[in-house]
Image (cartoon, rainbow, N blue to C red):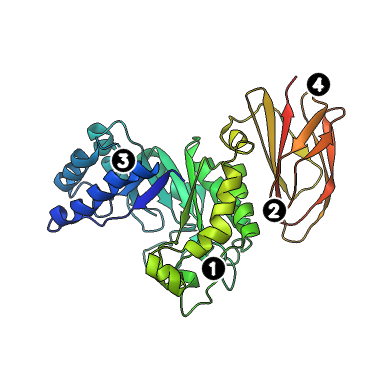
């Protein structure tokens, strides 16, 4: 964990009172190895409150606890005109060229009017906002009862693999590497009167890798602060530490360990690696003399062995990195291909590492 979000809704009347807790969080964050992703709600959609925007940015832009600004929230879904977001972005970068601006989209597209039903998200709907940010992203929380409600339900994919679908839309629309995906702890669709459900470790792990394979270079996790989703002990402490202990911490231990972290941050590799199963999604990366292959099974039902092809000549062996319940093991490569003899279960993810010749 390197970032924490502060989502202040700024007002001119309450500015002085609002600045104090933000300054306190900015002071505290570096002492925990963190930076703030600081929201600009109230001044992010256009320049009608330019003086207020200037005051906020000029006050905090030099603080070592600041990591990034959060621009307009879900602007495509909310029918926020792109021209206003772009104007805010240009003003922000003129005032502060050192911190990126992040815009996060909703997983549903806008209807013809604000009151019209949502439609399926499209790259065309979010593409105009790529010019209003340095980092473009999406939030998607598919674990609910019934499943997939956050994305709008059928005909949108209601399986947890919708995470990759939505991340792909943002990546294609944005055409840059700076993509963030916000993943689920809890959200309004699992609060009373809805059934309270959380992602399991297996689901959270798959969704993280699904986003990464689809192009995400940053992951956020939303909802640990929602009181209605906490048990009594967590309410007293102010955070969903139960979910952290059972799911989020084990996931982050894997993603940030010495074996996996190099694979997740490595540049994409110029090799066309393929699988003989249509439901497999792959991402090949190379760094430090190693080729990494991240492979996920997007199907919720299919299982079985998978053969991979397209590895560079000279690669003869590789390692399946350890993941929960599975120690590291070796695979043999011949003629640029290998078969993983351990059956690939539904919604499973594996990271392979090969030394390049």
The residue to which callout 3 is attached is: 66
The residue to which callout 1 is attached is: 149
Mark 2 and mark 4 in contact? Answer it, CB < 8 Å: no
Tell me the CA gap for discs 2 and 4. Answer: 30 Å
Which of the 4 image quarters holds residue 36? top left
Mark 3 and mark 1 in contact? Answer it, CB < 8 Å: no
Question: Earlier along the polypeptide chain: callout 3 or callout 2?
Answer: 3
Image point 37% across, 51% down: which residue?
A: 5
Question: Earlier along the polypeptide chain: callout 3 or callout 4?
Answer: 3
The residue to which callout 2 is attached is: 298
Tell me the CA gap for discs 3 and 1. Answer: 34 Å
Question: Earlier along the polypeptide chain: callout 1 or callout 2?
Answer: 1
Disc 2 secondary structure class: loop
69 vs 159, left or right, is left
Mark 1 and mark 4 in contact? Answer it, CB < 8 Å: no
Q: Is residue 139 visible?
A: yes
Disc 3 secondary structure class: strand
Indicate the position of residue 202 as horizontal and vertical percent values.
65, 58
Q: Is residue 296 visible?
A: no
Tell me the CA gap for discs 1 and 2. Answer: 19 Å
The residue to which callout 4 is attached is: 314
Q: Which is nearer the eye, 154 or 216?
A: 216
Disc 1 secondary structure class: helix
């Amino acid at each position: 964990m390197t970032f924490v979000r502060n989502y202040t809704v700024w007002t001119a009347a309450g500015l002085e009172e609002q600045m104090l807790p933000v300054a306190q969080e900015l002071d505290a964050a570096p002492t925990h190895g963190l930076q703030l992703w600081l929201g600009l709600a109230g001044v992010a959609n256009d320049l009608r409150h330019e003086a207020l925007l200037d005051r906020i940015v000029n006050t905090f832009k030099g603080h070592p606890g600041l990591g990034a600004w959060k621009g307009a929230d879900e602007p495509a879904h909310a029918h926020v005109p792109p021209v206003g977001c772009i104007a805010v972005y240009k003003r922000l970068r003129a005032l502060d060229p050192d911190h990126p601006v992040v815009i996060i989209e909703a997983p549903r597209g806008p209807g013809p009017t604000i009151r019209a039903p949502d439609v399926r998200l499209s790259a065309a709907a979010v593409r105009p906002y790529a010019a209003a940010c340095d980092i473009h992203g999406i939030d998607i929380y598919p674990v609910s009862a019934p499943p997939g409600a956050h994305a709008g339900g059928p005909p949108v994919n209601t399986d947890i693999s919708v995470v990759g679908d939505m991340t792909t839309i943002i990546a294609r629309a944005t055409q840059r590497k700076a993509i963030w995906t916000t993943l689920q702890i809890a959200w309004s669709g699992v609060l009373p009167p809805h059934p309270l459900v959380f992602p399991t470790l297996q689901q959270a792990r798959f969704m993280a890798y699904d986003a990464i394979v689809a192009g995400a270079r940053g992951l956020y996790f939303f909802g640990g602060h929602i009181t209605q989703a906490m048990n009594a002990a967590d309410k007293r402490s102010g955070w969903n530490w139960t979910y952290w202990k059972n799911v989020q911490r084990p996931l982050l231990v894997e993603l940030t360990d010495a074996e996996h972290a190099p694979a997740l941050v490595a540049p994409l590799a110029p090799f066309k690696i393929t699988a003989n199963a249509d439901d497999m999604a792959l991402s090949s990366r190379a760094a430090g003399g190693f080729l990494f292959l991240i492979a996920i099974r997007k199907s919720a039902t299919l299982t079985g062995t998978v053969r991979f092809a397209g590895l560079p000549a000279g690669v003869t062996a590789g390692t399946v990195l350890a993941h929960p319940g599975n120690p590291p093991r070796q695979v043999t490569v011949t003629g640029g291909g290998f078969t993983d003899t351990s059956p690939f279960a539904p919604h499973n993810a594996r990271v392979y590492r090969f030394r390049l010749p």
